[in-house]
Image (spheres, grey):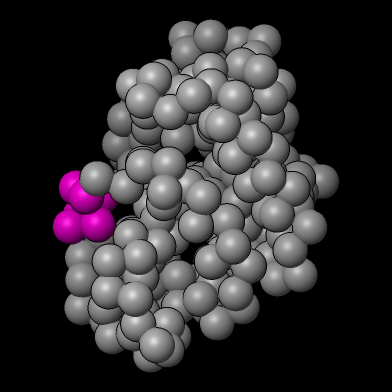
């Protein structure tokens, strides 16, 4: 398990990419970065501190914080969800998050990164991904999934509206929009359960294993 393996997992909001990334990272013993948590953490501290200038504020906050500290935060409130899609459109914010991720990637040759611009930007080069997956799920199933994540504290209708807006913002934004790369393997989580998602991803990884020996 010493050879390098870099996996990119991109997808729409609540498409199951986080679950898929966790499953495959556990199986192949990969360091896992959930890039969405970085943006959510940024939203959380902006909402809390209300800085006049968000870029210098975020640069300072992300300079020394560890990824492990970020992932232990509570970051899935509806307030953060409503804020983060607009924040992610900001080019300078994206650059801060890119640098933060690149720093971790360079230290870990066995890594899985999941988000919305991983194959197209973060792992596009230096280093490049070995394999990319693109997750999608129909809006109704994705909404129910996120609604349950929120412990049904928010009306399902509001969750569905939020997801629809977020995916539109992700795909239409000017900087690093969400898109499926030509060589990315499609994972439809409305058609596959967790077990089948892991099987499909594993089969595709085994196919490319000989290329990265």
Asked if 207 appears above or below 104 in the picture, the reply is: above
Q: Is residue 38 left or right of residue 124?
A: left
Q: Report the front residue among 130 and 160.
A: 160
Name the residue: 74% across, 48% down: 168
Q: Looking at the image, which residue sits at the far right?
A: 182
Q: Is residue 37 magenta?
A: no
Q: Is residue 181 left or right of residue 203?
A: right
Residue 212 in view in this figure: no
Q: Position of residue 87 (x, y in %)?
A: 54, 66
Asked if 157 appears above or below 65 in the picture, the reply is: above
Q: Main secondary structure of the magenta part?
A: helix
Name the residue: 51% across, 50% down: 82
The span picked out in magenta is: 68-73
Identify the image quadrant of the N terminus: top left
Q: Position of residue 14 (x, y in %)?
A: 54, 32
Q: Report the front residue among 39 and 116.
A: 39
Q: Position of residue 187 (x, y in %)?
A: 66, 25
Q: Is residue 70 magenta?
A: yes
Occupied quadrant, residue 109: bottom left
Asked if 33 appears above or below 92 in the picture, the reply is: above
Q: Report the front residue among 205 and 34.
A: 34
Name the residue: 57% across, 56% down: 85
Q: Position of residue 150 (x, y in %)?
A: 37, 28
Residue 22 in view in this figure: yes
Q: Is residue 178 left or right of residue 75?
A: right
Occupied quadrant, residue 159: top right
Q: Is residue 50 left or right of residue 190?
A: left
């Amino acid at each position: 398990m010493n050879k390098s393996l870099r996996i990119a997992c991109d997808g729409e909001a609540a498409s199951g990419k986080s679950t898929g990334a966790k499953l495959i990272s556990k199986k192949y013993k990969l360091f896992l970065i959930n890039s969405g948590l970085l943006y959510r953490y940024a939203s959380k501290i902006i909402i809390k501190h209300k800085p006049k200038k968000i870029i210098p504020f975020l640069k300072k906050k992300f300079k020394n914080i560890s990824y492990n500290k970020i992932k232990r935060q509570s970051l899935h409130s509806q307030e953060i969800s409503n804020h983060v899609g607009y924040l992610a459109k900001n080019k300078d914010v994206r650059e801060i998050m890119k640098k933060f991720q690149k720093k971790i990637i360079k230290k870990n040759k066995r890594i899985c990164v999941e988000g919305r611009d991983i194959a197209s930007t973060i792992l596009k080069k230096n280093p490049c991904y070995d394999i990319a997956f693109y997750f999608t799920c129909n809006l109704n199933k994705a909404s129910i999934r996120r609604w349950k994540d929120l412990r049904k504290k928010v009306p399902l209708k509001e969750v569905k509206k939020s997801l629809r807006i977020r995916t539109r913002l992700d795909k239409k934004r000017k900087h690093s929009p969400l898109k499926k790369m030509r060589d990315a393997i499609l994972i439809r989580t409305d058609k596959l359960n967790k077990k089948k998602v892991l099987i499909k991803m594993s089969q595709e990884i085994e196919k490319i294993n000989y290329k990265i020996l």
